[in-house]
């Protein structure tokens, strides 16, 4: 299975310009609200029509502006799980799922498929319940079953956990991952949560201002996001302007320190980033004196704020995230923190639509 998307759509002052290809597996689209994630899914599903471009799924053209091809949503073999699940409130679980089996004419076959997905989605015994009688997780599984019984070639999830509390979200994330792995085929999952994207997706596209600027395997992306926007979207808190000073060295201009890297530094480096978890008082590499300036307490970790001794005055404090049992006592004037070269993220200008 494969999906190819290359489309443009103007919406007033906002322009969606998206180009990517996805193979079997779960591809996440990660980005802030308003960046075009949801509109991208709507265009693929046929709910919205792009102004130009093409969309191809498993060799079948769903949309092509030049050839004037625009298949109807029901002809696209695309399953679309909306944020609010879009269940029919006046229909039971059984009736909602049966809506996805309208094309199956054999009554016995419909019943076999229904029974299979009731068992798979842990909904057996709830067949005669209405959506209002179900929990958020049960509603989600009914909506997903209604999609999967129709055997879509592409499954798209639009913020599937946004309406759930944190405990239920974590539980359903495990269930959803198992379901999608059994499903096979191509899946797209839109989210603004980097934790969901990291756990659920085999690859992640980072989206900003209507365009995808980075598409990488998930672990590779978090290890080397490439741009300031990519590093910020994957959770990095500490940034400085930077210039190259050696093949494996750069100067963090805002912090007043030189840092050794694990990978060669390109000449067009613009910034450096260091994740808050990556500092250590015992690491001798890239170790410099700092002044601790404050802290933020969390349930199981603390965030220690600090500044390098030669840091520019109008730049923000850095964050060091640490388990509570390792929190330093007091505010030392001669404290030193280091970080390994592999943790120093050299960041470069974005190359929009390079995928």
Image (cartoon, rainbow, N blue to C red):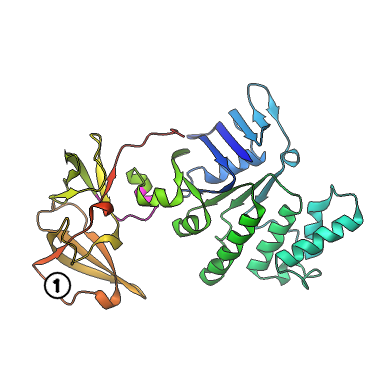
Badge 1 element: loop
Range of the magenta residues?
Answer: 231-239
Is residue 235 inside the magenta stretch?
Answer: yes
**Looking at the image, which residue is at 81% across and 70% down?**
128
Identify the image quadrant of residue 110: bottom right
**Looking at the image, which residue is at 19% across and 63% down?**
283
Tell me if residue 206 can be seen.
no
* Residue closest to the eye, 83 or 171: 171
- Is residue 317 toward the left or the right of residue 33 in the image? left
Is residue 293 inside the magenta stretch?
Answer: no
**Looking at the image, which residue is at 70% across and 58% down?**
143
Dividing the image into 4 quarters, which one contains the N terminus?
top right
**Looking at the image, which residue is at 19% across and 74% down?**
328
Tell me if residue 2 can be seen.
yes
The residue wearing badge 1 is 331
Residue 326 locus on image (x, y percent): 25, 75
- Is residue 98 toward the left or the right of residue 256 in the image? right
Residue 153 locus on image (x, y percent): 69, 44
Residue 347 locus on image (x, y percent): 29, 43
């Amino acid at each position: 299975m494969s999906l190819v998307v290359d489309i443009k759509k103007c919406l007033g002052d906002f322009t969606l310009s998206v180009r990517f290809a996805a193979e079997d597996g779960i591809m996440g689209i990660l980005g802030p609200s308003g960046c075009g994630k949801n509109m991208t899914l709507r265009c693929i599903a046929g709910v919205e029509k792009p102004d130009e471009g093409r969309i191809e799924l498993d060799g079948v053209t769903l949309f092509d502006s030049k050839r004037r091809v625009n298949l109807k949503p029901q002809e696209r073999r695309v399953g679309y799980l909306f944020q609010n699940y879009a269940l029919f409130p006046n229909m039971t679980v059984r009736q909602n799922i049966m809506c996805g089996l309208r094309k199956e004419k054999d009554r016995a076959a419909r019943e076999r498929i229904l029974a299979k997905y009731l068992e798979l989605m842990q909904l057996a015994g709830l067949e005669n319940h209405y959506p209002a009688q179900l929990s958020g997780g049960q509603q989600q599984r009914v909506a997903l079953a209604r999609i999967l019984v129709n055997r879509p070639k592409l499954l798209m999830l639009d913020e599937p956990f946004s309406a759930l509390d944190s405990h239920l979200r974590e539980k359903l994330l495990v269930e959803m991952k198992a379901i999608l792995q059994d499903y096979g085929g191509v899946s797209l999952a839109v989210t603004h949560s980097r934790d969901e994207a990291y756990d659920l997706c085999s690859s992640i596209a980072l989206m900003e201002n209507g365009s995808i600027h980075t598409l990488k395997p998930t672990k590779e992306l978090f290890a080397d996001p490439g741009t300031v926007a990519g590093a910020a979207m994957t959770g990095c808190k500490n940034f400085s302007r930077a210039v190259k000073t050696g093949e494996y060295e750069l100067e963090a201009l805002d912090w007043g320190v030189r840092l050794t890297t694990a990978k060669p530094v390109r000449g067009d480096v613009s910034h450096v980033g260091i994740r808050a978890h990556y500092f250590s008082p015992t690491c001798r590499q890239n170790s410099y004196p700092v002044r601790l300036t404050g802290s933020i307490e969390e349930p199981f970790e603390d965030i220690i704020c600090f500044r390098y001794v030669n840091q520019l005055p109008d730049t923000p404090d850095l964050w060091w995230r640490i388990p509570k049992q390792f929190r330093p006592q007091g505010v030392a004037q001669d404290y030193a923190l280091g970080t390994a070269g592999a943790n120093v993220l050299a960041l470069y200008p974005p190359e929009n639509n390079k995928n």
